[in-house]
Amino acid sequence: MAFISRLVQKTTSTSAKAALWTLFGFGSSKVIQLLSNLVLTRILFPEAFGLMVIVNSVLIGLALFSDIGIKPAIVQHPRGTETTFLNTAWTVQVIRGFILFVVACLIAYPMAVFYKQPILTGLICVCATTAFIHGFNSITLALVERDMDLKRMTIVTTATQFLSVAIMIALAFMYKSVWALVVGNVVGAVLALIMSHLYLKPHKHKLMLHAQSWQEMKHFGRWIMAATFFTYLGGHGMKMVEAGFVSLETVAFLQIATTLAMVIREVMGALQSKILFPSLSRIHRESPELFTLIFRRYAIKLLVVPLLGYSLLTLLSTPLITFLYDERYNPSKHYLALYALAGLFSVLTSMYENALLAKGCSKDSFRITLSNAVLQISALVLGFWLADVIGMVTGAVVASFCSYCVAAYLALQRKILLGRIEVVYLALAFIVVLISIAINFPSVFVGQIDSLAEFHHELEWKNNG
């Protein structure tokens, strides 16, 4: 019992420090991102952001298609700190970065033809250099996440983001071109590479493919690779699908709403990947009988943020968009309200996904992301067919809830269901959904009331007749 008490205390203390640095880093990152977004939307035209949505979707898609779970493997695997394991991981990372660059350049022209935007060829090729650069990042970026020693990593990411954004804004002022966004991304990648080697814990990087390490990494990552493929389809890949249905201007409106809604999702993702996942991985390695107990303790704390955040975001979507952006971007307010509602359910899904991954159940993680991708794409197409853009975004809410149901079922099978915590959260979430619809889409309720009144009058007429 004394050992268990010390383990829980150590895990909690380390997690608290990691949480503070994660929140500081994320908060700083979002402030920088928001300020740059507000400045750039006033300098550049909406279509520029629509173009960058397509470019980023292509690059992120390639990155996720080839993700074999290098970082999660280092965090979760018992041999994750060994030199041969780390150098093998770094070598695979370098090779992967080069392949991503080549593939991106090969598909750049076909993408430009498909979207009828010739400029996409150059944009994609130049932006693809960031994948090649990231391949040489220090492998200690994963090691500090395993140890939850996030101070230095937070400083590195915040500093590089600030400098790249400053360059981006300066170039936008001078040239009023979408190329300002591209150059800013490349500069940010170079700065991140340099600082990851100079400022993080020293590690003697060496190109190496240790057979046993590679096999263990590949065995753990095979389902992660499949899962990230469908993560893309259900996430960033949706933007490419949307771009095929609507204009670049509408894509920009959707992207603004997504960016604001993703603030909470990203902070939760950061907390889950940098705290929940490594903490539960340690518990699973050292004292697996405590896994569900610790998971529920974390859940109580971690679910408060998204419940409050998404609730405020969906209820205040109209004044928020009106305050932050000029009238050209007004359509984003309804999209933001719906994306925030989808986030209420997706946070539970991602929490279960991290817990299952920490237990080594990467196949279950794949099942969750597969179902989410299928549901999101189906809901997007069906929603657009039924009710145009607003139906497409509403479909994201329905798909997110259905994906949560799949995750909850798998968690029940692994005996890690959150139980009463989850019931309370869902009850409050559904109350928020109803209030949000009443505020942002009053015609839904008004339409129902009018329909009922018409039916009642018709019934009375028949009875009187």
Image (cartoon, rainbow, N blue to C red):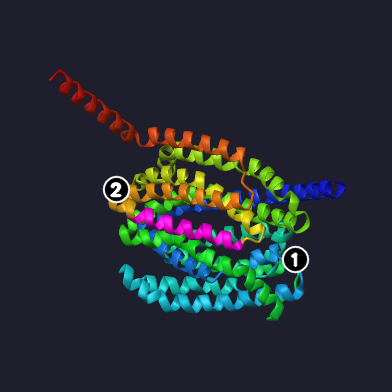
How crowded pointer 1 is (Cα within 10 Å; few <14, some 14-19, many 20+) is rated as few
- Residue 10 x, y percent position in the rendering: 80, 50
Task: Look at mark 2 in the image and give the residue it sits on.
Answer: 387
What residue is at 35 percent from the left and 72 percent from the top? 112
- In the image, 347 versus 204, the foreground residue is 347
Toward the top, the furthest residue is 464
Quarter of the figure with the C terminus: top left
Question: Of discs 1 and 2, which sits in the foreground?
Answer: 1
Determine whether 87 is above or below 391 in the image: below
What count of labels does the image hold? 2
The mark nearer the N terminus, 1 or 2, is 1
Asked whether, in this view, residue 7 is left or right of residue 143, the answer is right
Q: Is residue 237 left or right of residue 309?
A: left
Considering depth in this image, is 70 or 459 the residue closer to the camera? 459
**Residue furthest left in the image:** 465
Segment colored magenta: 362-381
Frontmost residue, 77 versus 290: 290
Across and down, in percent, residue 123 comes to 42, 70
Which amino acid is tagged 2?
Ala
Residue at point 41% right, 59% down? 238
- Magenta residue check for 373: yes
Residue under circle 1?
78
Q: Position of residue 186 (x, y in %)?
A: 53, 69
- Mark 1 and mark 2 residues within 8 Å of each other at the beta carbon: no
Q: Which mark is residue 259?
A: none
Q: Which amino acid is tagged 1? A: Pro
Q: Is 375 placed above or below 195 here?
A: above
Determine the residue positioned at 33% across, 53% down: 382
Residue 360 in which image quadrant: bottom right
Residue sitting farthest toward the right: 2
Instruction: Determine if residue 317 is in view.
Output: yes
Q: Is residue 198 left or right of residue 54?
A: right
